[in-house]
Image (tube, coloured by chain):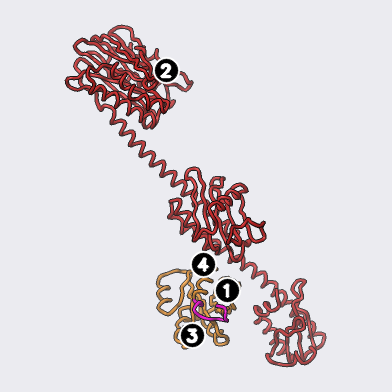
Chain colours: A orange, B red
């Protein structure tokens, strides 16, 4: 199973995504914003990042740009989440190299299916 | 609640606690369970492994002992008391975290259900045709509940039986039907798995759930779900129930829509039939020398069994007919059209035509058809001779036919033969009536004489005879309106029960 970093300043959402991912056997790291996410990634390698767009300090798009500009994370799967569903968010996500874009509220089935799809091409922990 | 999981989830809190003890002078802090060291601070220090701890306390949540926190390098009663207090706080934190985890599970489940229902409603709302709706429900539900296959079976009186499977039929039609009958009878969901009695599960199916779908309190459909890897657990069943509730509303909409469509279609057909039947009746009476003629028909429903007709061609006598096919509605209308055509063709083309020959030949033609459906038609056929001022007529069981001589007493012209289609013998004979100036003949149908009021009394012949007699001096049109008005007033809001048709002929 994979190690997944969930980045969202909304703690209820953090808990819900974390619960769903852990239930499916993944290890979950939590961060409240992009800066904290980058700090975590210094300490521990992750297989996938799920990040909200709107957050304080460093938002999801800025985090995505950082990751894509860093050779270590240029091909790391990133799922962007938004509550607005606005087209410009989707375009920005695509243009900055997001692998998937989900609109909140997200069902656990949709979250897991997207994670599995993105991890499908990679061998993680010998499980996938 | 395994200590390993708790350590993993609460590692930050354990580490913070350990750091504070190290800062206070401890040389090592370790978490032990069943004689094994699970975590230690600082990492890689050998002390908790190498020698006996100076302080130790049990980490207990509720009645369950999860493990032990051991500290090396500090001792004394105060330190022991602090350790007990720290672990008490930690156990409370773990318990709260556990509760929060349960609440999160419920929240995720509720949100999943709401989103599933939203998905279902969005995906099915545009389907208003039954098979399409069933396919859509089966497909979406299979995906939402995560089963290998699903089926929907609808058995509604207005639609009949429809069955769909998605993506493949894991169970045969007979098995599905049997499962449907079981849930229809019990009105509750049926769950079968490998623990159920043998032979209850179809081949290749390791578990199934069939849920009844009620519309208006009646089980009219069932949703079947086959082979769910995680089993039909409580959350899955809750989702199934929520989906069947939504499916019930959707199916009710579809059935209502179908019913409305059928009604609209029927209404349109009836309106077309009304138009067609109205066109079978003459649009206006012919201009016959020496006669003033008025005719009108008011069906009780869209279409009826009454008819009247005028046949008047150059070189041929003037013939008219009034008929009433037993019954009302579409069947009566069809027989009415046949009767009218039969009479008209005889009147148009038979040599030496008279009412008697018309009726005998028409009865020959129609007896088979009428007797097959157990119906008949009363018919009055009249033929006017303007030279001799006579009316030849045959009355095949028809009433009321009222003749009123000028200034005289009105009377009924009784039937002189049985209704057409009733007997397979040609028993019709011509009757003759001398018509003088000012005489009135009204040939009506029993929609007048048998009209009823709110007390269920019938209008009767006598009132019609008197009406005709008292108004015989009036024009044909006026006499007709007096008949209609009198019956309308008598019925006084009681709905018209039968077709009302008349021809009024006044000799000029």
**Residue B398 can be seen, yes or no:** no
Q: Which mark is residue B459?
A: 2
Above or below for B436 versus A22: above
Q: Are marks 4 and 2 on the same chain?
A: no
- Nearer to me, B166 or A64: B166
Q: Which mark is residue A73?
A: 3
> Closer to the N terminus: mark 1 or mark 4?
1
Question: Mark 1 — residue?
Answer: A21
Q: Which residues are magenta?
A: A118-128
Label 4 element class: loop
> Closer to the N terminus: mark 1 or mark 3?
1
> Which marked residue is nearer to the observer: mark 4 or mark 3?
3
Q: Chain of mark 2?
A: B
How far apart are the alpha carbons under marks 1 and 4? Answer: 16 Å
> Closer to the N terminus: mark 4 or mark 3?
3
> Which marked residue is nearer to the observer: mark 1 or mark 4?
1
- Residue A62 percent location from the top left of the image: 46, 81
How far apart are the alpha carbons under marks 1 and 3? Answer: 21 Å
What residue lies at 45% left-to-right and 52% top-to-bottom? B131
Above or below for B441 versus A82: above
Question: Mark 4 — residue?
Answer: A105
How far apart are the alpha carbons under marks 4 and 3? Answer: 27 Å
- Nearer to me, B283 or B333: B333
């Amino acid at each position: 199973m994979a190690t997944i970093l969930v980045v969202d300043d909304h703690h209820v959402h953090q808990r819900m995504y974390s619960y769903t991912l852990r239930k499916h056997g993944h290890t979950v790291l939590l961060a409240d914003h992009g800066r904290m996410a980058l700090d975590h990634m210094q300490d521990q390698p992750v297989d996938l990042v799920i990040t909200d767009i709107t957050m304080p300090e460093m938002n999801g798009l800025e985090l995505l740009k950082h990751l894509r500009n860093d050779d270590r994370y240029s091909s790391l799967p990133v799922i962007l989440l938004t509550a607005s569903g606005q087209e410009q968010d989707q375009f920005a996500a695509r243009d900055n190299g997001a692998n998937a874009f989900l609109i909140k509220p997200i069902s656990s089935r949709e979250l897991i299916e997207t994670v599995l799809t993105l991890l499908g091409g990679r061998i993680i922990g010998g499980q996938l | 609640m395994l200590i390993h999981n708790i350590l993993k989830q609460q590692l930050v809190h354990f580490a913070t606690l350990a750091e504070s003890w190290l800062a206070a002078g401890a040389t090592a802090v370790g978490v032990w369970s069943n004689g094994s060291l699970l975590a230690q601070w600082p990492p890689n220090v050998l002390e908790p492994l190498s020698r006996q701890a100076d302080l130790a306390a049990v980490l207990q949540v509720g009645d369950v002992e999860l493990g032990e926190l051991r500290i090396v390098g500090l001792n004394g009663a105060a330190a022991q008391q602090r350790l007990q207090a720290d672990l008490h706080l930690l156990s409370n934190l773990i318990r709260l975290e556990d509760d929060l985890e349960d609440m999160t599970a419920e929240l995720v489940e509720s949100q999943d259900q709401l989103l599933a229902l939203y998905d279902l409603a969005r995906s099915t709302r545009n389907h208003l045709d039954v098979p399409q709706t069933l396919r859509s429900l089966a497909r979406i539900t299979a995906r939402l509940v995560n089963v290998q296959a699903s089926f929907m079976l609808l058995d509604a009186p207005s639609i009949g039986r429809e069955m769909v499977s998605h993506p493949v039929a894991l169970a045969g039609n007979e098995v599905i039907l049997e499962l449907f009958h079981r849930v229809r009878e019990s009105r509750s969901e049926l769950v079968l798995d490998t623990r159920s009695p043998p032979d209850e599960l179809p081949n290749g199916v390791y578990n199934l759930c069939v849920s009844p779908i009620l519309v208006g309190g009646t089980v009219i459909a069932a949703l079947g779900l086959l082979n769910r890897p995680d089993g039909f657990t409580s959350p899955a069943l809750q989702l199934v129930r929520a989906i069947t509730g939504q499916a019930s509303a959707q199916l009710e909409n579809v059935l209502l829509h179908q019913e409305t469509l059928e009604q609209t279609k029927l209404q349109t057909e009836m309106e077309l039939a009304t138009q067609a039947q109205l066109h079978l009746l003459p649009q206006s009476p012919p201009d016959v020398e020496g006669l003033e003629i008025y005719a009108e028909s008011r069906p009780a429903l869209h279409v009826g069994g009454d008819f009247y007709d005028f046949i008047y061609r150059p070189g041929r006598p003037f013939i008219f007919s009034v008929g009433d096919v037993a019954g009302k509605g579409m069947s009566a209308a069809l027989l009415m059209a046949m009767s009218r055509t039969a009479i008209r063709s005889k009147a148009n083309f038979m040599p030496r035509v008279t009412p008697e020959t018309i009726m005998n030949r028409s009865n020959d033609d129609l007896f088979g058809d009428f007797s097959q459906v157990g119906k008949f038609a009363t018919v009055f056929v009249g033929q006017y001779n303007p030279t001799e001022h006579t009316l030849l007529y045959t009355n095949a069981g028809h009433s009321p036919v009222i003749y009123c001589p000028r200034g005289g007493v009105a009377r009924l012209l009784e039937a002189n033969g049985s209704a057409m289609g009733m007997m397979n013998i040609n028993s019709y004979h011509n009757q003759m009536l001398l018509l003088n100036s000012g005489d009135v003949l009204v040939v009506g149908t029993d929609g007048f004489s048998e009209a009823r009021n709110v007390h269920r009394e019938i209008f009767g012949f006598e009132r019609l005879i008197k009406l005709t007699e008292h108004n015989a001096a009036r024009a044909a049109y006026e006499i007709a309106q007096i008949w209609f008005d009198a019956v309308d007033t008598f019925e006084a809001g009681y709905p018209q029960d039968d077709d009302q048709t008349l021809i009024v002929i006044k000799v000029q």
